Every structure is written in C-alpha cells, then in structure tokens.
Amino acid sequence: LKPVAALASTATSYPTTHDKIQPVENTPYFVDNKFVQSTTDRFIDLRDPATNNLVTRVPQMTDQEMRAAVASAEKAFESWRGTTVLARQQIMFRFVQLIRENWDRLAASITLEQGKTFADAKGDVLRGLQVAEAAIAAPELLKGEVLEVAKDMETRTYREPLGVVAAICPFNFPAMIPLWCIPIATITGNTLILKPSERDPGAAMILAELVHKAGFPEGVVNVIHGAHGTVDFILDEPAIKAISFVGGNKAGEYIFSRGSANGKRVQANLGAKNHAAVLPDCNKNHFINSVVGAAFGAAGQRCMALSTLVMVGETKEWLSEVAERARELKVDGGFEEGADLGPVISPESKRRIESLIESAEKEGATVLLDGRGFKPEKYPDGNFIGPTIISNVTPDMTCYKQEIFGPVLVCLNVETIDDAIELINANEYGNGVAIFTRSGPTAETFRRNIQAGQVGVNVPIPVPLPMFSFTGNKKSVAGGGANTFYGRQGVNFYTQLKTVTSLWQSSDVVAKKAAVHMPTLQ
Ligand code: NAD
C-alpha cells in the first residue's frame, strides 16, 4: 500500500475558481480509514466541465486492491455489527457536524468537478446532509415488534444488518447520492463499499475523510474507484450482500438483473422524463418561476428536473413569457458571481444534447429559445448550452422519447386535464410529476390518476425529504420500485428481519404424548 497523508484540499483551503490546478494529483482510494494511491496503470481523466482543464486522474483500481477493500469491510463488519445503535448514533452526530463544517469545501469540489453553480452545489450537500440527520433517528427506526401470540409464548422481530453492502453512484449529485447510502447503511450496522462516479469522486473523498474524523472504525466505509470493471467486480463479489444504484437505465437495468441473479438485494433508481401539467387557473407567475428554475437549474442534469411541459388549453400562449424569463438566466462558470447554471458534464454530453435539439427541428418542432453554441466570455472551452425551449412537440418525437439530461424544456399542447393525464401516463418513465392549478378538486383528480411516484402540487421538484422515501415509479426504478432509498423503507432495505418465537412456560409440562399436528393456537 502507498498511503497518502491527506487530501489536497482542507476545511479552510479549497479551490474557489476554475483556474488550472498545478500539479494535478491522482485521486486516491480509501480503505481502512487511509487514503491510498492505486498501483494501476489505467486512469480516467477528470476535466473541469467549465474549462476542460485536467483536474485529477481517477484510477481504474486493480482487482487485488478492490478485493482488499472488501476484505477490510468484511473484517470491520464482525465488530461493527456488535456495536450498539446508540454508539453508532454518536458517530453519526459527529459526522453531521463535520459535514456542516466542510459544507463549502464539499460544494467547491462539486462545482469544480461536476460544473453546477456553487449555490446549487451547497443544496446538493444539504439534501445529503439531511439524510444523515434523519439517520440519527435509527434507534426508533430499528425497533422491532413484539406480541404475545399464545399462552407463555411471544413473537418478536429484530432488524439485523446484512453485512458488506455496496453503493454505485451517478455524476449528477456527487454528495447527495453517497449520502443517501453512507448514513443509512452504516447506522443499521452494515459496512459499505462506495463507488462514486468516476466523473466526479471529489466530494465522496472529502466525505471519506469526514467518516474517519467522525470516528467510524477502519473498514466501515471504504471508497473504491473505476468504471464498468469496478461495477462488474461489485456485482460478482460474493461477500457483497446488497447494492444501491443510482444512475441511467442502461447501467441500472444491467446492474439490477446481474446483481439479483447473483443473489444480492438491489435497489436501483434510474432515468426520468418529468412532466408538469399547467392549468389556466394556476398562479402564472409562480408557475413560470417554478418551471424555469426546475427545467434549467443544474443545467437540467437532475433526475427530478422538470423537462417536459404539458400546456393545457390557453396556457400555450404563456410560452413566450417562459422563454423571456429563461433568457434572463446567467449561464457561466459555477464559481462566478450570479451564475444561474453551469456547463453540462462533458463534451460528449453537450454533443448528445445538441443533436437531440437538432432532431426536434428536423421532426417538425419549433426551437423557441436556442441555447446551442452559447459560450460564456470567460469560458470558451467549456461544455455550455444555454436554456433551450422546444415547442409544438408531439409524443412520437425523439426529443420527447429520450431523457435529454440538459437545459432543454420540451413543450406539448393538450386541450383538457384528462388529455394531460393520458399523455403523461403513456410515458414509460414515472419519477416525478407536477401540476400547477388553484383548484383543489383538479389537483386531487390528478393526484389520484397520475402514474408517477412523486407528485408536486404547485411544487416543481417534489423530492421527498428523508423522513419519507424516494419513490420513483415505472421505468424510473428497477424491480418495480420495491426497494426505495432512505426513510423507513431505506432502513428496511439495509436490514434483514429476524422473527423469534419463544415459549417460557410458567407451569410444568404435564402432557405425556408429543403433539404431531400443526398447532391451531385456539
Ligand atoms: P450512469 O448510469 O452513466 O452512471 C452511474 C454509475 O454506473 C456510475 O458509477 C458508472 O460508473 C456506472 N456505469 C455507467 N455505465 C455503466 C455500464 N454500462 N455498466 C456498468 N456500470 C456502468 O449515470 P450518470 O450519467 O452518472 O447519471 C445520470 C443518470 O442518473 C440520469 O439518467 C439520471 O436520471 C439518473 N439519476 C437518477 C436518480 C433517481 O433517483 N432516479 C438520481 C440521480 C440520477
């Protein structure tokens, strides 16, 4: 092992500009509470999306190194599972405090590696931090049930940890998604192998440092790196009992089926195409602000981005005002004062998004606001696309059928709320949906009939806070959405129920014959 003393950034010193980083250091991995440089000769270049300057190289770790990380987690499990939930809770209190103290540093790492604005990156950290805060309620969440089921007999349930579990994360929330997993997996007594996205692992590395400082014992959280090879290692490693995956459909469906076939529990949140139905009776100004924020914030790279507008009746006349407000957004490097949205993750992603806009034009839609080719003055080499609005879209168009995952809003017109419900339900994704209306009965009809897992009524991005669970539906989850992230259901995912029935007789046994029939407990 080649240990590294510490990460390059610290709680008080971290990048706050997109200036070139010199010298560029390779990202270490994290095992037994130590940062270690991989001995691999295969690295993935990580470039700042605002400039395409090289930030770091992420190792495709060797199998031997990954196996050692799993062995460390297996060893740690033997003692970690025996700690009390109250002891684990104390560590979680410290972890929460350390995340707060390193909030800006975490956000800065996200802005540098992922591209989102610093203010938005702070939100990324917060939504993860809230999961850690909610995990502190574990003593309550882990309580079992008990019932006297017969004379002198009781049945009680225990929630036991699974063992070593793994998390495979996407690029778009470099702090939030690791924090959907680290707190719930560990407070329930498991040990965790975390694989951040190879495109922006910096925030996860800072979290690893905080894991150590908070007092997690060695091996309870190990962070490994790589792309497909690392995923395949996780899928086939027998010691790993469960996998949490968040990302796109291609990877997620593969991970769900191969992981399940290998006998592992898998929770998998996948892609999306989130619709908003807009009714003429809504608060127009609130609707415009909501949709512009939710379609273009984070450059549209949120799984709950509001990427599809369904304009009911005369609301289609409002589109020019939506475009006006979208035009006012400042597209710039994420560290720049007043930036509203930053670049998309990579040049390939930019090309893919631009080709989807082009396909809309070719298929007969109208590009009402065109962000293609936009270059902020200071960042001519970044992966920028300005807010783009495509109107007169129909469900057969490529831009409607595919998840664009960029700052592009596609707009369809319908006549009635029933048409809107029918159109939205015909879409294969079902992550989030919103309705804008002042009518309670209309909202209620929509809520009852819509086939999406997370519904916002005048709320554009209805991501549930962590005392609830993230409940995507249809093609936005694998396995029918049975295993959802965080909340009570997240605790269920990371624990195995054990049900114990005991008989403690208060008087001597007098029967001389063994009973052979099934007891009827009358
Ligand atoms: P991605 O699927 O490309 O990558 C996710 C992870 O899977 C990464 O760690 C990557 O290394 C690995 N991976 C990628 N392709 C793989 C393959 N073919 N085989 C094995 N492993 C593979 O996703 P992304 O581009 O990082 O993230 C964006 C996607 O994630 C979008 O589709 C978005 O909707 C989705 N997402 C969903 C949620 C949700 O909760 N539903 C949340 C965030 C992001």
Image: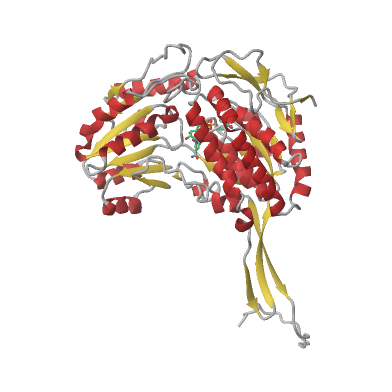
Q: Position of residue 382 (x, y in %)?
A: 48, 15
Q: Is residue 271 above or below residue 517?
A: above
Q: Nearer the viewer, residue 42 or 303?
A: 303
Q: Position of residue 322 (x, y in %)?
A: 28, 30
For this rendering, which residue is in front, 212 or 54? 212
Is residue 482 at least partly visible in the picture?
yes
Residue farthest toward the right in the current orientation of the protein: 1
* Quadrant housing residue 68: top right
Regarding residue 250, the answer to whether it shows in the image is no
Q: Quadrant of residue 342?
A: top left
Q: Residue at x 63, y 75 (%)?
A: 149
Q: How is the image coloured?
A: secondary structure
Q: Position of residue 170 (x, y in %)?
A: 55, 33
| Residue located at (59% from left, 44% from top) | 132
For the N terminus, the quadrant is: top right
| Relative vertical location of residue 158 with respect to residue 240 in this rendering, above or below | below
> On the picture, is 206 further left or further right than 429?
right
Residues 14 and 21: in front is: 14
Q: Position of residue 276 (x, y in %)?
A: 33, 40
Q: Position of 28 compared to 103: left or right?
A: right
The vertical placement of 222 against 479, above or below, is above
